[in-house]
Every structure is written in structure tokens, then in C-alpha cells.
Image (tube, grey):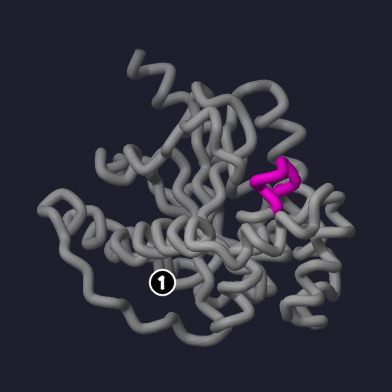
Amino acid sequence: MPSAPSRKPLMYSAATALAAITLGVVSWQATADRDAPAAPAAAAAPEAAEAPDPLAALARRDPGDKLAAGRADAPVVLIEYSDFKCGYCGKFARDTEPALMRKYVDDGTLRIEWRNFPIFGAESEAAAKAAWAAGRQDRFAQFHAAAYAEGAKEKGFGEERLTELARAAGVPDLDRFRQDMAGADALAALRKDQEEGYRIGVASTPSFLVNGQPLAGAQPLGAFEAAIARAKARAQASK
């Protein structure tokens, strides 16, 4: 994958600066070579690395969040920083996320919160705003699936192509979709997600937080299962 984009300067609170340093140490780049054999789950997220409060607190748990799946009060929240032009994000979306949905979201254990984190230029940003616009009509999940389908990113994310994807996703009002996609609210939502990612040190996509614990890259299903099990156990123990 291309090298990570340069950071934009941001003002840091003391707590957030600590979060960024912690992420740098734990390392979003632990899986920089994603073609290499996966490390054991325990190595990907050591038990000793307790989640700093600023990172765990990033879970929004908003019942009205259109870019989330699962109960707002689920014991485990997986936050995903992702880009529609990222091939490894597509691999996660096709190979791993559906299994997490069936095994953990459906039974109330897990909530998945999407963060648009486009790093591959104008088409990445356009696709992110289109996904947000589809979400305004309760079709984010369907748009997400269409945009991450095998071969979808190779067709690009120009305006006409994004409308085609919205149609395939069953977005009912395409005129509203186009207006929402081009509107100020879509840009504001995108910038909010981007700035959150930059602020905590996200360096590549896909990157994840599991109840505040970093997990980098499209790792195998077992790595996510292990991280979710640890996070659930800690959440139960803290009650």
C-alpha cells in the first residue's frame, strides 16, 4: 500500500497527545506488510496494553448513527477507520466483517462504528461522502457492500459511478442522494472522522480500535475474535 499521508497540524489536549503517543508505541503499523503470515492474536494486541481512556472514549454509541451497526450499549465497540479505494479495506469488508456481524453483532456483543478515513485522494473523499449520503436514507450498509464488492474500486468513484452504486444499494431518492453527497453536512461529517483519525495517530487503512485497543490491517478473523473476547471479558470484569 502507499505510504501514509502527511499529517495536518492539529491542536492536541494533553490526554489526546498521550493517546497518539500510545498508538505510536502499540503501533498501527504492526501489520504494515499485510502479505506476510499473520502473527498470533496475542502478539497483535498484548494483554498488558490496557486501553487508555481517551481511546476507549472515542466510541460514540449514538443510537442514531447511520454509519454503525449493533446495539449502542453493546459491551464491545469496534471502530473502523477505512477508505473505499483501499484494497485491504475491501478484503476486510468481504472476508471478515460479515462473519463478525453474524457472530457478534447479531447477538448484541459487538457494535461496529465506521469512520470515513479517505487517504487516496479526491475519489476516496467522494466515495466517503456518498456513503454518508446513502446512510441518510438508511442504505449505508448496502452502499458499503456495493462499493467494496470485488472489482468495484477498479471502476473508480466518479459522480456517475457513485450514483450507480447508490442505485444498486437501493437508495430510494437519488436526487436527494446527490444533493446530500455534495452538501456541507457530508463534508463536515467527513472532516470530523478524518480529524479524529489524524489526532490519534492512524497511519494506514484499515485500522481499528476494539474498546480502545489498536488493531491494524485486514488481519484474519481469529485476530478479531481474540480481541473481541478480551474486550468483552474486561468489560464484564469492570462491572
The answer to whether 199 appears left or right of 72 in the picture is: left
Q: In the image shown, does 104 or 181 lie closer to the viewer?
A: 181
Q: In the image shown, does 239 or 114 lie closer to the viewer?
A: 114
The residue shown at (72%, 26%) is 106
**On the rendered image, what quadrant is the C terminus found in?**
top left
The residue shown at (29%, 77%) is 8
- Magenta stretch encompasses residue 155: no
Q: Amino acid at mark 1?
A: Ala
- Residue 164 percent across, percent down from the top left: 85, 68
- Residue 70 percent across, percent down from the top left: 62, 30
- Residue 67 percent across, percent down from the top left: 60, 45
Q: In the image shown, does 92 or 34 lie closer to the viewer?
A: 92
- Magenta stretch encompasses residue 137: yes
The answer to whether 11 is drawn above or below residue 69 in the figure is below
Specify the quadrant of the image occupied by residue 138: top right
Name of the residue lying farthest toward the bottom? 2
The answer to whether 31 is drawn above or below residue 227 in the figure is below
**On the rendered image, what quadrant is the N terminus found in?**
bottom right
Point out the stretch of residues depicted in magenta. Answer: 134-140
The residue shown at (36%, 43%) is 58
Q: Secondary structure at mark 1?
A: loop
- Residue 76 percent across, percent down from the top left: 50, 31
**Residue indicated by mark 1:** 203
The answer to whether 130 is drawn above or below residue 160 in the figure is above
